[in-house]
Amino acid sequence: MHDPNCIFCKIIKGEVPSEKTHHEDGEVLSMLDLNQSIPGHTLVIPTDHYRWFYELPDDLSNKIMKVMKTLAKKLKEEYSADYIEVSIVGIDVTHTHVHLIPHKKTISS
């Protein structure tokens, strides 16, 4: 199921170009955020349109979490990050998406 007005659905259908990244399997896709202020800012999305993450079927949300964990490890290494921020908001684009953002520690302990 797709929403014809959703930018992520258009990307999935190939109607809008994107810089896809480490994962694409027919159910879950990752891509670089087009407006990234931090290098490596990656989005993980289901290929079917769901407005909110709590609407996802359990098997799909579990799969997305596994993809996120795998990608977080790759991003941590690739960008020499100290940690990966994870955020699920869903306001800017009305298609469930998870932000994975590599960070270096900025606060000294």
Image (spheres, grey):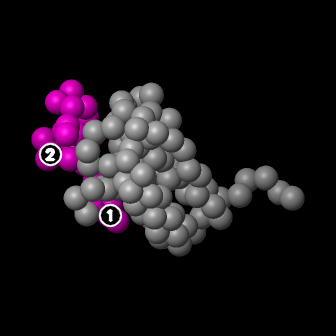
Q: Is residue 37 above or below residue 75?
A: above
Residue where numbered disc 2 is placed: 13
Label 2 sits on a secondary structure element that is loop
Answer with mark 2 or mark 1, whichever residue precedes in sequence. 2
Label 2, label 1: how far apart the Cα atoms are: 16 Å
Residue 34 part of the magenta-drawn span: no
Residue at point 17%, 30% (across, down): 4
Q: Amino acid at mark 2?
A: Lys
Going by the image, does 80 lie left or right of 6? right
- Image quarter for residue 109? bottom right
**Residue farthest along the front direction in this orientation:** 58
Residue 14 part of the magenta-drawn span: yes
Residue at point 19%, 40% (across, down): 1
Q: Is residue 37 above or below residue 85?
A: above
Q: Is residue 91 visible?
A: yes
Magenta span covers which residues? Answer: 1-24
